[in-house]
Image (tube, rainbow, N blue to C red):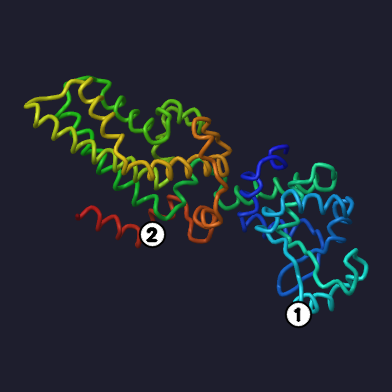
Amino acid sequence: MSELTTSQHQRQNILNNRYALQAAEQHLGLGGVVFNAETLFTKQQVTALFGISDATVERYISSHGEELKANGYRILKGKTLREFKVLVDVSLTDEGNKAPVLGVFSFRAVLNLAMLLTESDRAKAIRNRLLDIVMDVLVERTGGHTKFINQRDDQYLTAAFQEQSYRKQFTDALDLHVVENKWKYARFSNLIYQSIFKENATEYRKVLNLAEKESIRETMYAEVLNLIASYENGFAHELAEAAKGKGGKLTLQEAEALFIRFQGHPLFQPLIHDARAKMASRDLGFRDALHQKLEAYIQSIPEADFDRFLGDTSKSLEERLSDPATLAVFKRLKDR
């Protein structure tokens, strides 16, 4: 609970989840006034709701103004204010009926304030209920399988299918161009993982609490799989060129030195940063899994990602595999 009052990322992850907000507005019953198809709250209504003073509200507006404004706190004036006054008797508020401006909170901004307030028992109760609603929505929309929420993305299957193809090129290149060593496939796979997201397979499996027989790649997001495929395809090419230049197979040490040079290419840097940010942020927000080595990359999950993984276009892997359109895409990829 303390994380919500201290972590803007955690607060924004809830506020960007429109499915959770819709359920919260339906079940919390916080009141407010419907104005232009949106529920708004005056400062007086907010102070009554949370049992706090006007000065406390003003203090939070001052200290967290940008965050609250981004989530719907705004100033009404002019014609909009006059229309709002028809619905609400603002003479009861400190601004007075003749005030030229009036600050109002959207439902989203009220929840934002509830997640900030540390001196209100009512705000704490709303936070508790809100967290329950968020979990209920997540379970309902994923069927309870957040471990494989990555597979609900409509880009996942294509990325996974293509990565398998590049994986074969990668392992074939290790066979053809690196001296025999029973650990070389795991070794170079881990070098790729560590280059992209700073964890080897064992560390990644522990973060996501995967069973021994569960495939780690089946839990990876499309962007991560695409980057792994790029590494595999590119390094397979580098191995072939290096072996050709040497006139024979590379030793394990030579191949590792080649990989170190390969991964340092500047073209990878923006892609690595993007993959790390998406993995760290999504896994924390959707799976409650913290990649400690990627903690600096954690961001709020954007609204588009909630649509992507929880929205109407998201589907389970089983649903996608039975979709004729998906099968047609696979056939085109296979025929290439």
Q: Position of residue 72 (x, y in %)?
A: 69, 61
Residue at left 93%, top 67%?
92
Q: Quadrant of residue 236?
A: top left
Picture layout, residue 279 above or below residue 158: above
Taking the image as shown, residue 53 lies to the left or right of residue 191, namely: right
Q: Which mark is residue 323?
A: 2
Q: Which mark is residue 79?
A: 1
Nearer to me, 268 or 77? 77
Dot 2 alpha-carbon crowd within 10 angstroms: few under 14, some 14 to 19, many 20 or more: few
| Mark 1 residue type | Lys
Q: Position of residue 271 (x, y in %)?
A: 38, 45
**Is label 1 or label 2 in front?**
1
Q: State which tag comes first along the sequence, 1 or 2.
A: 1
Residue at left 62%, top 57%?
19
Picture layout, residue 246 above or below residue 298: above
Tell me the SS state at disc 2.
loop
Q: Position of residue 80 (x, y in %)?
A: 75, 76
Tell me the SS state at disc 1.
helix
| Mark 2 residue type | Asp
Is there CB contact under 8 Å for labels 1 and 2? no
Taking the image as shown, residue 145 lies to the left or right of residue 336, namely: right
> Most extreme residue toward the left, as rendered?
247
Nearer to me, 268 or 321? 268
Residue at left 57%, top 45%?
144
Q: Which mark is residue 325?
A: none
Taking the image as shown, residue 59 lies to the left or right of residue 208, namely: right
Dot 1 alpha-carbon crowd within 10 angstroms: few under 14, some 14 to 19, many 20 or more: few
On the rendered image, what quadrant is the C terminus found in? bottom left
On the rendered image, what quadrant is the N terminus found in? top right
